[in-house]
Amino acid sequence: SGDGFLSWEEFSSVLDDPQLTTFMHTLELETHDLENLFHMIDDGDGEVGVDEFLEGALRLRGPARSVEVSQVLYTARHLDAKMEMLLKSIDVPENSRREARKTTSQRRASLSMVG
């Protein structure tokens, strides 16, 4: 749309474009990689900055080393445990802690899809 942002509608409409497919192939990326990247960058409003998206796509290039992915997942689990202890220590109700765990689990699932 020329505003520097890419909406989900704009993005999804070009996923099957032959030029984009060729570009993705040169970066060793699949369509689902870009879809996951869009959702990771999106802050919930259904739009991402074009520059931010392109930088993210270039970072995804090539296979991630399993050691790097394992480190990120380990850190996420470690932070989950710390967050749970903190929420308990400040006496946050169980239903709020459950919601926090759900959100964190969704983020962790997104990370595991990248690797």
Image: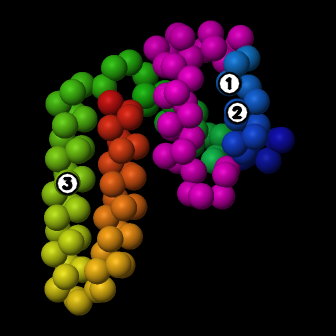
Q: Position of residue 91 (x, y in %)?
A: 23, 89
Camera-nearest residue between 49 and 114: 114
Q: Which residue is mark 2?
A: 12
Q: Which residue is mark 3?
A: 77
Determine if the magenta segment contains residue 27.
yes
Camera-nearest residue between 25 and 50: 25
**Circles 2 and 1 in contact, beta carbons < 8 Å:** yes
- Image height check: is 30 above or below 90? above
Is disc 3 placed on a helix, strand or loop? helix
Which quadrant of the view contains residue 102? bottom left
Disc 1 versus disc 3: distance between alpha carbons? 33 Å
Q: Which residue is mark 1?
A: 15
Q: Position of residue 78 (x, y in %)?
A: 16, 57
Which residue is painted at 76% across and 37% down in the image?
10
Tell me which amino acid carries mark 3. Arg
- Image height check: is 86 above or below 8? below
